Image: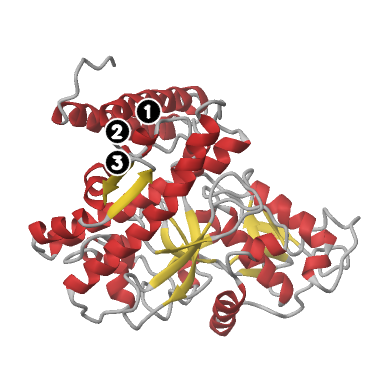
């Protein structure tokens, strides 16, 4: 199973013990005294994130992160700076936090950047947390501008996560929420700033837009405040009424944050322009990847693969194109006019070949993220070839699920296998619809 899929592994529930014993000690990571989280502290956190987190934050501080690390890392760093409680649920269901003493042999320092004890614990915490632990450290919130603030985490059922970077309420952005995101594997890298595009969240795992739970001291032990006792708690985003009358989940979120009515014709111009910029950024990555990998193998997991493959980028393109499809449909826009606009946007994908935005719009599901593939395949020009490759990859995913989860978690295996079989069904349908030659072997 690819590294991208590992970052987007489906979340499932498991039991967890959310407590730990503590006493203020010079051996713990940092002291909090009587400091505790509150609505006012959450506002200060939001302000700090907006003013301090930028694309180079983790490069400056030499901290490797992946998609799941980002929310945890930002929360812990802020808590360390301002002496607030912080906790995290590990893969083996332990609650660790500012009270932990496992790193007491390392020196500490008043500045977090120079605090070896904190930095070592931070890296350990990031290695022990995933998007599958996030449901135990967060709670779902009401979707409004008071609750959805910078620093607020989000994660989707496929287990990609990030944080809110900025909330824009003047209509200048195609979505009021801007996000900071990273990708797999964990490495020192720039953060990606994006508009908020996400599929419908899953109520069983409380995915979607969430906030971190508040650690509290009770009977000498640190535990989490129960989700429903937090001030922003709400399951609003899981209700069917939340989506009624909207393009999709992302659109429903946008209208809850900024209910102003904007001209659909102006909005679609902004949306197409935003996607175009993203596609243009992809062109040099694909060209250089082809140059480096056409004569030299770039196996998955290699440095060249990590540099020139585009699974995360392509996944975001898919989400944006899905949103564009639904936007056009919901607002009954003139499809001929939209097509004309799309066909006028030309993307030079190589020295002697170009494709239109409309071509990408029609074939975005068949973009290849593999740097070893041809330029044509990378841009969806070899659709039938890509269907065969995706079928092969889906079969590998099913085999991985069976081997890894069948015995230890059969319910999760059934759930994951069902999703992969649904992908196979859609691939078969697309093979027939595209009139690809030959027969598929399943």
Q: Residue at x 78, y 67 (%)?
A: 113
Locate residue 60, reporting x and y percent.
70, 64
Determine whether, in the image, residue 299 is placed left or right of residue 78.
Answer: left
Q: Residue at x 16, y 66 (%)?
A: 245
Circle 1: element type: helix
Asked which quadrant contains residue 429, the reply is: top left
- Quadrant of the image containing the C terminus: top left
- Residue count near mark 1 (Cα–Cα under 10 Å), binned few <14, some 14–19, many ≥20: many
Q: Residue at x 58, y 74 (%)?
A: 49
The reply to whether callout 1 and callout 2 are in contact (CB within 8 Å) is: yes
**Which residue is nearer to you in this view: 169 or 20?**
169
Q: Which mark is residue 105?
A: none
**Which residue is nearer to you in this view: 151 or 61?**
61
Instruction: Please say whether residue 78 is visible from this viewpoint.
Output: yes
Asked which quadrant contains residue 55, the reply is: bottom right
- Residue count near mark 2 (Cα–Cα under 10 Å), binned few <14, some 14–19, many ≥20: some
The reply to whether callout 1 and callout 3 are in contact (CB within 8 Å) is: no
Determine whether, in the image, residue 113 is placed left or right of residue 134.
Answer: right
In the image, residue 417 sits, relative to residue 167, either above or below, namely: above
Q: Identify the residue position indicated by label 2 in the image.
A: 423
The reply to whether callout 2 and callout 3 are in contact (CB within 8 Å) is: no
Disc count in the image?
3
**Which residue is nearer to you in this view: 39 or 15?**
39
Q: Identify the residue position indicated by label 1 in the image.
A: 394
Circle 3: element type: helix
The disc, 2 or 3, on the residue closer to the chain's N-terminal end is 3
Instruction: Please say whether residue 8 is visible from this viewpoint.
Output: no
Query: Gap in Å between the C-alphas at discs 1 and 2?
Result: 7 Å
Q: Identify the residue position indicated by label 3 in the image.
A: 365
In the image, residue 136 sits, relative to residue 311, either above or below, namely: below
Locate residue 260, reporting x and y percent.
25, 82
Circle 2: element type: helix
């Amino acid at each position: 199973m690819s590294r991208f899929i590992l970052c987007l592994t489906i979340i499932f529930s498991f039991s967890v013990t959310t407590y730990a014993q503590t006493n203020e000690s010079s051996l713990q990571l940092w002291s909090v005294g009587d400091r505790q989280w509150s609505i006012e502290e959450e506002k200060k956190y939001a302000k700090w994130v907006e003013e301090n987190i930028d694309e180079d934050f983790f490069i400056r501080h030499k901290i490797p992160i992946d998609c799941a690390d980002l929310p945890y890392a930002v929360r812990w760093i802020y808590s360390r700076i301002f002496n607030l409680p912080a906790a995290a649920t590990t893969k083996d269901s332990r609650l660790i936090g500012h009270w932990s003493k496992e790193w007491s042999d390392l020196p500490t320092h008043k500045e977090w950047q120079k605090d070896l004890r904190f930095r070592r614990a931070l890296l350990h915490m990031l290695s022990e947390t995933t998007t599958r632990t996030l449901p135990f450290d967060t709670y779902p919130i009401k979707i409004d501008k008071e609750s959805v603030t910078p620093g607020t985490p989000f994660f989707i059922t496929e287990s990609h996560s990030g944080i809110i970077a900025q909330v824009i309420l003047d209509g200048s952005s195609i979505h009021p929420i801007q996000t900071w995101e990273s990708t797999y594997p964990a490495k020192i890298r720039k953060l990606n700033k994006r508009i908020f595009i996400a599929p419908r969240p899953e109520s069983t795992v409380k995915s979607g837009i969430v906030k971190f739970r508040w650690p509290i001291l009770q009977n000498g032990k640190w535990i989490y405040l129960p989700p429903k006792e937090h001030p922003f708690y709400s399951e609003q985003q899981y209700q069917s009424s939340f989506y009624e009358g909207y393009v999709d989940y992302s659109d429903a979120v946008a209208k809850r944050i900024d209910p102003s009515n904007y001209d659909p014709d102006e909005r679609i111009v902004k949306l197409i322009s935003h996607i175009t910029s993203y596609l243009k950024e992809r062109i040099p990555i694909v060209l250089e990847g082809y140059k480096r990998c056409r004569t030299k193998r770039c196996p998955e997991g290699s440095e060249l693969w990590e540099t020139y493959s585009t699974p995360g980028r392509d996944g975001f393109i898919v989400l944006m194109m899905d949103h564009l499809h639904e936007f056009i449909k919901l607002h009954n826009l003139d499809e001929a006019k939209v097509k004309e606009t799309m066909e006028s946007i030309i993307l030079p994908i190589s020295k002697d070949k170009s494709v239109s935005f409309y071509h990408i719009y029609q074939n975005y599901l068949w973009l290849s993220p593999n740097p070893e593939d041809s330029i044509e395949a990378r841009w969806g020009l070899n659709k039938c070839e890509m269907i065969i490759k995706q079928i092969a990859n889906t079969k590998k995913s099913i085999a991985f699920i069976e081997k890894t989860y069948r015995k230890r978690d059969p319910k999760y295996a059934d759930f994951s296998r069902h999703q992969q079989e649904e992908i196979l069904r859609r691939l078969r349908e697309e093979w027939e619809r595209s009139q690809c030659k030959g027969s598929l072997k399943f």
